[in-house]
């Protein structure tokens, strides 16, 4: 199982704070959700890069490894499952098809894209995100499965 320890720890600390201060359904909860959206998406993007580079490492070519890492960092922003599928298609369309068959219209895809889309909206000026802490925590738990699927499709043990 892939680790998202930084995000998981932050979610745990935020839950503790909201519970101890009785600040669920307040502006404090909203601020913490905004923070967590950015943090989680950052970790999601890092994890896609790590998994993909682990697969590229199998080629044994350090120049290809460097090239692919640079391309991913430049090209793939606002990483939703559709962009992950496009990245897999760069390896082989069969990988993309396999990923899409498992992921499309799944609860995990909805949760993953919900997190990414809300982070994008917040980062671009929409401060009235309608996502509670509990919604975010639930979506995060489901969304992590996308990385197990992505790893598996690439032939990397998660």
Image (spheres, grey):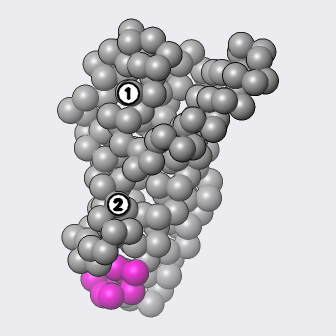
Q: Main secondary structure of the magenta part?
A: helix
What span is colored magenta in the figure? Answer: 24-31
Say if the magenta span includes residue 136.
no
Which residue is nearer to you in this view: 27 or 41?
41
The residue at the point 56 percent across, 67 percent down is 10
Say if the magenta span includes residue 30.
yes
Q: Are marks 2 and 1 in contact (CB under 8 Å)?
A: no
Placement of the C terminus among the 4 image quadrants = top right
The residue at the point 48 percent across, 35 percent down is 147
Quickly name the residue at label 2: 120
The residue at the point 62 percent across, 54 percent down is 5
- Mark 2 neighbour density, 10 Å: few (under 14) some (14–19) many (20 or more): some
- Mark 1 neighbour density, 10 Å: few (under 14) some (14–19) many (20 or more): some
Q: Position of residue 12 (x, y in %)?
A: 53, 67
Placement of the N terminus among the 4 image quadrants = top right
Quickly name the residue at label 1: 85
Would you say 84 lies left or right of 129 here? right
Give the image quarter of residue 117.
Answer: bottom left
Where is 123 relative to 142, above or below?
below
Q: Position of residue 157 (x, y in %)?
A: 61, 22
């Amino acid at each position: 199982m892939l680790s998202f320890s930084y995000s998981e720890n932050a979610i745990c600390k935020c839950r503790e704070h909201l519970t101890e201060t009785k600040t669920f359904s307040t502006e404090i909860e909203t601020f913490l959700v905004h923070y967590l959206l950015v943090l989680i998406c950052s970790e999601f993007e890092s994890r896609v890069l790590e998994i993909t580079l682990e697969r590229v490492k199998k080629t044994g070519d350090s120049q290809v490894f460097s090239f692919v890492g640079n391309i991913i960092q430049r090209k793939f922003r606002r990483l939703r499952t559709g962009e992950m599928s496009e990245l897999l298609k760069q390896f082989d369309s069969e990988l993309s098809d396999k990923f899409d068959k498992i992921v499309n219209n799944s609860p995990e895809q909805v949760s993953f894209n919900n997190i990414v889309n809300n982070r994008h909206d917040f980062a671009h000026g929409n401060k009235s995100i309608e996502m509670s802490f509990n919604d975010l925590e639930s979506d995060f738990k489901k969304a992590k499965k996308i990385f197990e699927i992505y790893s598996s499709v690439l032939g990397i043990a998660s």
